[in-house]
Image (spheres, rainbow, N blue to C red):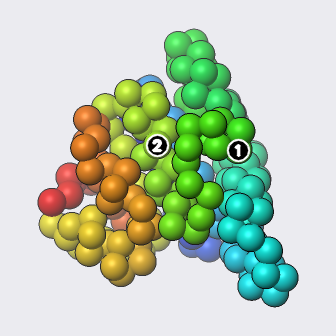
Amino acid sequence: MKVIKLGGSLCSSSQLQPCLAQASSMAGVVVTPGGGAFANQVRMAQHDWQFSDAIAHGMAILAMQQMALLFQGLDGSFVIAGTVGQVKAALAKGHRVIWSPQRDELDGAGVPASWEVSSDSLAAWLAQALSANELVLVKAAAVAAGVSFSQLAEEGVIDPAFCAMVKDAAFKTTVVNAGAFCAGIVLPHA
């Protein structure tokens, strides 16, 4: 099983639909959406209104849920599943799945409610919870071959908590540019 996180920034490029098409061509796939423009609105609202990170986290989860609906609207071959149990059940039926994370499940698992943990880390959490074989983060940003996760975090390509989330992971983890993903080029990271 493979978890593929499609970054929300792909919505501002022409690569979202080709990336969805590439993901839908694979068996045993769970797509995790980023929050995209919806999450950016949460960041701006928090800046303007100064509400807590816990509230912002809940709103960012809703942003991912909106993106899940958008993704399914663009490619109806996927089904939406909200919990780990629902994802497993959908995969067992042979479906390609888009994960629409549920705040209660994440809170119950002790996932921190902060901007340090974005959809990147949530995808890693899901990959672990599903005992996935592989996690692929697909980004609009350029990703140089051989760059470390810590370098990608310093550059702001992945979130700060991601390195710790995948440190002892049993699954293979890759961060790749959308163009390379659509071309079928997915190389493991250093």
| Residue 58 showing in the rendered view | yes
Residue, disc 1: 103
Q: Along the line of sight, which residue is nearer the eye, 154 or 75?
A: 154
Question: Closer to the camera, 102 or 143?
Answer: 102
For image coordinates 39% across by 59% down, the residue present is 162
Q: Is residue 68 above or below residue 158?
A: above
Residue 109, horizontal then vertical, whole percent: 56, 37
Q: Residue at 37% of width from left, 31% of height from top? A: 132
**Is 41 positioned to the left or the right of 93 in the image?**
right
Q: Nearer the viewer, residue 97 or 48?
A: 48
- Seen in the image, is 7 located left or right of residue 180? right
Question: Which residue type carries mark 2?
Answer: Trp
Badge 2 is on which residue?
A: 125
Question: Residue drawn 74% across and 56% down?
Answer: 58
Q: Position of residue 68 (x, y in %)?
A: 69, 47
Residue 126, placed above or below residue 114: above
On the question of residue 77 being in view, the answer is no
Residue pictured at 36% horizontal, 44% vertical: 135
Residue 30, given in percent of the width and then of the height, sits at 51, 35
Label 1 or label 2, whichever comes before in sequence order? 1
Tell me if residue 23 comes above or below residue 117 in the rendering: above
Q: Secondary structure at mark 2?
A: helix
Q: Measure the alpha-carbon separation of dots 1 and 2.
A: 13 Å
- Residue density around tag 2, few if under 14, some if 14–19, many if 20 or more, within 10 Å: some
Query: Outermost residue toward the bottom?
Result: 48
- Three-letter amino acid code of the residue under disc 1: Arg
Callout 1 crowding tier (Cα within 10 Å): few <14, some 14–19, many ≥20: some
Asked if labels 2 and 1 touch by Cβ distance under 8 angstroms, the answer is no
- SS for dot 1: helix
